[in-house]
Amino acid sequence: MMTFNRLTAPIGVLLASVVALNFLMLTAACGQSAQAPASDSTNAGKAVFSRANCVGCHKWHGNGGGGYGGDALSLRKTELTRDQIIETVGCGRPGTGMPFFTRGAYDEVKCHEMNRQDAGAQMPPEGGTFLRPKDIEAVADYVIAHIKGAGEPTYAECLTFFSSTSRVCDVYKTEPQNPDRATANTGKDQ
Amino acid sequence: MERSSGHTRMLTRACLLAAAGAAASVMGTLPVCAADQVNQERLLNVDKEPGNWLHHHQNYAAHRFSTLKEVNRDNVKNLKVAWTMHLGGIEGGGIWSHGGLEGTPIAENGFLYVTDGWGSVYKIDAHGGRGVLVWKMDPKTDRDWAGAVACCGVDNRGVALWGDLVISHTLDGRLIATNKETGQVAWQRTVADPDKGEVITGAPLIVKNMAITGVAGAEYGIRGWIAATDLATQKEVWRTHTIPGKGEPGSETWKDSDNAAAAGGGSTWVTGTYDPATDTIIWGVGNPGPDWDNAYRPGDNLYTDSSLALDATTGKIKWHYQHTPNDPYDYDSVAENVLVDIPGPSGPRKLALEADRNGFAYAIDRTTGKFVWGLPFVKKVTWTKGLDAESGKPIEYDPNKPVQTYVASVTPSRTNMETDICPGNMGGKNWPPTAYNPDLKLWYIPVIESCNRIKVEVATPDKLKAREFWTGGGPSQPFKITGSVTAIDVTTGKVAGKMETPFPNLGGILATPDLVFSGQPSGEVMALDAKSLQKLWEFNTGGGVNAPPMTFTVDGKQYVAILVGLGGAWDKWFIDATPELKKIQPGSMLYVFSL
């Protein structure tokens, strides 16, 4: 179960403008994966991001967010280094809903200088699947390359993640503005 | 083989009759058989065909009561599996790792129509003591699009029948009509928009050639509605928002300056009921959003957490009854309203019964919308000391207060940011349907006996984003949650019995003259004595029961059917309250029992 402990304070990624951000993201997407996904060295990490169900709480865009099951941290706003991400995926976050993904964590492999007994009630849940060290490094590389520091999600990023198989990206085509929210003045707005 | 050929002869005869009448409309490539046409006359008179189960809730009044009694108190101990069928639809999508089964099968003339969580419809021939798949209609739901904004699981609660069509919904917002004979899609219409956080999980209600659709998404900042689609023209007849527009009656109950009403929730994701005597649809409305930060939306927040009576022809609101004004607990009132007539001192009392997430069962006069009685049906309620005997409102409710605090020491608020509430935010009673035995006047509630912990996160307008959670906090599960089947005597408004269960009731109830059927998410399907609630029979399906049982006959023999496959909200958001259920595997299976 996710809880609300924020271990890092959200840092604002200062954006010169949305246009500039979009340009950057498009450039990044085109340069790295949209046109030649097979050549992106972080594709393996992207596959882990889906397979290990990181998307279940952090969402495809990594922003996580408060919700029914609690608050998964934003990987876009994270200040964690590659090594810290690797440790967090492997060991989970004690006292929160972030699971551990290393087989034997808190048993054969000490995490945060703790074993299962030391962790006690703070013991994080076990991931739905175990990941090998190479998988964990790959997913960390993916987070560093495509998610950390990336500002708000964009259409190009979404297409890169999903290809064109789903309408999940349509909402990012324009400003994420629900027309219903501007006004609620009639009963027939659909 | 014999039964099969006998059925063919019967169909042929029906088709010939239809052709002779020269009134058969042809939708697909096969002739339409008059005996299988479903119309308003049949939907109004389901008691004349007790071997069929034509409505999602069995009848328009949501009794989920079958008069079939081949299986009864004396012989239910001999009930055994007649046949099973594996279904599909457990794939993941969006934020969900797998789907589950919450549907009620529809039975007509020996055929079953069931859905899986992604909205595939299966027509199954149940003749001859076995199940044979006739066709499967896969709507190819956009899983990532819809699954990312489904708060509480990959769910579809079933179909309805109309004419020669099977009417169903998909999570990604469509209303689909499938030819009953061929399994081909006749037409489809987009009703809800996942781009706005809207998804559909409920079964359609058919009223006078219209399909009535409810919507989910109050955790994603939707403005809820109930919509009617004309099944002949495929056009929208009416759409009534559950949150009034500016200047409309009720809009004064949203007193903030951030236009909270425009994203104020009020989902309608459980199929409602219909009273033909007054041409009234009665439908439950869910929680306001953001769920746990009620200071963001001062005022009573109509018509959230209300039962709503609509003119079926126009969709106009006739009356409303609100259970938890300015709700800070996520206490939806989406539950079905069960329509019951009981003798009173001055003629029959026409009641609408609702078992609310907030832990109280209510009887409302369904002519006037006035409170008749209410009582707690769960073992523990902490958020209020009780209901006002006259109004039925929580006794701490103060209409002059913009932000309600109820029992302030336990109520989530901006000054009480982490707190434990009972019932927990799943309720009380969630979507799993109740059943009503009109002979015994007993109403059976599938209960989640629960408390949980709520953490408040202050909502601000900049946090409101399309397709992102809009909850103002979230629950966690430090407490064990159990369940019960609780019976209420509708003539007295008192609890008549409670059969406690180790796990919450996530499936719902079927009543027959002397039995009550239900299930457990740990796998058991059970039959209880209708009066004593003593357990008379149990079978472990080996899966998690997350759907209601129903019963039907084929060639005169009675069967009990139930879908088995734990999904929904529980195993993602609430599993820590029932750690034993972590071992229940995703599954998708139809069980059919007989003597």
Image (tube, coloured by chain):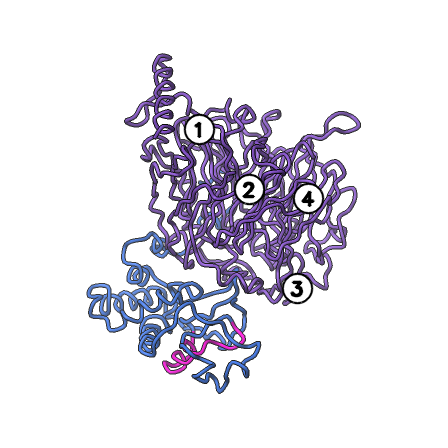
Chain colours: A blue, B purple
The picture places residue B5, in percent across and down from the top left corner, at 34, 26
Q: Residues within 10 Å of mark 4 (few under 14, many from 20)?
A: many
Q: Amino acid at mark 1?
A: Asn
Q: Name the chain letter of the residue that bears numbered label 3.
A: B
**First in sequence: mark 3 vs mark 2:** 2
Question: Based on the displayed image, in which of its 4 quarters is residue B458 positioned?
Answer: bottom right
Q: Distance between the Cα atoms at labels 4 and 2?
A: 25 Å
Q: Residue at x 38, y 65 (%)?
A: A61
**First in sequence: mark 4 vs mark 2:** 2
Image depth: mark 3 or mark 2 in front: 2
Q: Distance between the Cα atoms at labels 1 and 3?
A: 50 Å
**First in sequence: mark 4 vs mark 3:** 3
**First in sequence: mark 1 vs mark 3:** 1
Q: Name the chain letter of the residue that bears numbered label 1.
A: B
Q: Residues within 10 Å of mark 2 (few under 14, many from 20)?
A: few
Per the rendering, the mark at residue B487 is 4
Q: Secondary structure at mark 4?
A: strand
Q: In this view of the protein, which residue sits in the foreground, A10 or A67?
A: A67
**First in sequence: mark 1 vs mark 2:** 2
Q: Do marks 1 and 2 both belong to one polypeptide chain?
A: yes
Q: Which residue is mark 1?
A: B109
Q: Residue at x 74, y 35 (%)?
A: B491
